[in-house]
Amino acid sequence: MNEQNYIRYRKIKGFLNSLAFYTCRLFPIDKNLISLCTFEGKGGFGCNPKYIAEELHRRNPDYKFVWLVNDESWEKEFPSYIKKVRNSSLWSRAYWLTRSKVWIDNYRKPLGTVKRKGQIYINVNHYTLGIKCTGLLRGDGFSKMAYIVSKNDSDMIDELVIDSKWCEECFDKALVYDGHMLKTGAPRCDVLYGDRTEQKLKFRKKHGIPDDGKVLMFAPTFREGAKDGVRSVYSEVWSIDFERLIKKLESKFGGDWYICVRVHPQLAPTFAEYKDEKLKGKIIDESQADDFYEILAGMDAYITDYSSAVFEAGFAKIPSFIYADDIDKYSNDRGSLYWNLATDPHDHVTNNKTAHPNMDLVFPFPIATNNDEMDELIDRFDAKSYEACLDEFHDKIGLVFDGRASEKLADKIEQMK
């Protein structure tokens, strides 16, 4: 099917789906009903919607919550005050969304979704600062169909949650959005603010490691393509040497170190098969956990390639590094990045002026492209210099991070209701 025919097909399907929403207007809006969804129904009780739901429930037990979940994620666990409903069933989705006073989502609603008068849609996007360009900033990498879906969703949004001037300057293009932006910070980052001792001890107890054990999270992004067309999460895709990494961390910082791996959910089953007798007991797989941020709050260090979570680790001053062994290829495949990773020297990567013409920034995290460079970065790491660099960066981007994002959003929702 060529692109034009595919778009025609999707528009017809969207129109037919919209009829279910109009039909469900036979039912009144329930002023206390709040619908939530993460990652198009693939996610569980996590990301920004989780923390807003917890705060609203704490304030008023009379609020009713439904969480839209796909069939393949139906077994995910939720608190007793949240009702799971089928996102993959059109009539279920149409009924519960049409009856809800408030929608909270960290992604896009499917084409054909229709919001009615009197409803409130808060979009708590699943990233704020980032490395990978999205939306119109991807250029040719952003398809016509993606634009149609994005525009349809954006036109329904009442408030888009952001955390910085950085977002204000680019999210109109990144999310095809021209509405109001609510600068409260990301609710999921509240758990990263201040003392993280409780989260650290909770993680160590869960995995049976010593309370004084040190843990680094390795959380690479999902990338298309692999050797002979077969995706692999270790040898063919990431060349990082876990054994070498642990030895280097222990020699630099002291203590016993462990690695918590968080791969993309699509690759989680493959990584579960990874075995290395030399690292027995040292590798912890948290790829299936619903709440990434509770885990991140328990970490002592962080490594990714292109995940936006590196910035959020930086909010908490967690020592964070980039390990990216395919920068040129990834930059070309993605279409565009927010940072000039492929052209600038690794110790002075500047921002992409197309996305942020009014900002002059330097990427605040050390970058390695192989294991030798990773060793050097860890050897040279200085906590005071790193934190000073982050302070300057956060000041320039106008970051809002005070541990009160959930509270501020709950205030706003109650005010709008």
Image (cartoon, rainbow, N blue to C red):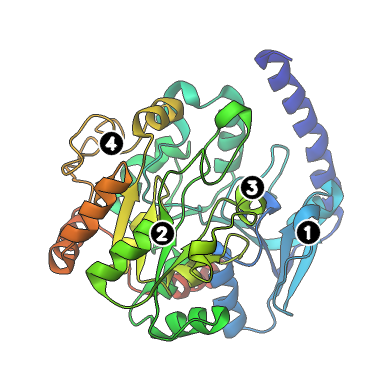
Establish if 5 lies above or below 196: above
Please tell me which residue is depicted at 21% across the width and 52% down the height of the picture: 376
Marks 4/2: CA–CA distance: 27 Å
Between 372 and 191, the one nearer to me in the picture: 372
Question: Quadrant of the rendered structure where residue 417 is?
Answer: bottom right
Question: Between tags 3 and 1, which lies in front?
Answer: 3
Determine which residue is flagged by label 2.
243
Question: Between tags 3 and 2, which lies in front?
Answer: 2
Please tell me which residue is depicted at 36% across the width and 75% down the height of the picture: 193
In the image, what residue type sits under mark 1?
A: Trp
SS at mark 1 in the image: helix
Marks 4/1: CA–CA distance: 44 Å
Determine which residue is flagged by label 4.
341
* Numbered label attached to residue 96: 1
Q: Are the residues flagged by discs 3 and 1 in contact, CB closer than 8 Å?
A: no
Marks 1/2: CA–CA distance: 49 Å
Marks 3/2: CA–CA distance: 25 Å
Q: Is residue 78 left or right of residue 92?
A: left
Density class for disc 2 (Cα within 10 Å; few <14, some 14-19, many ≥20) is: some
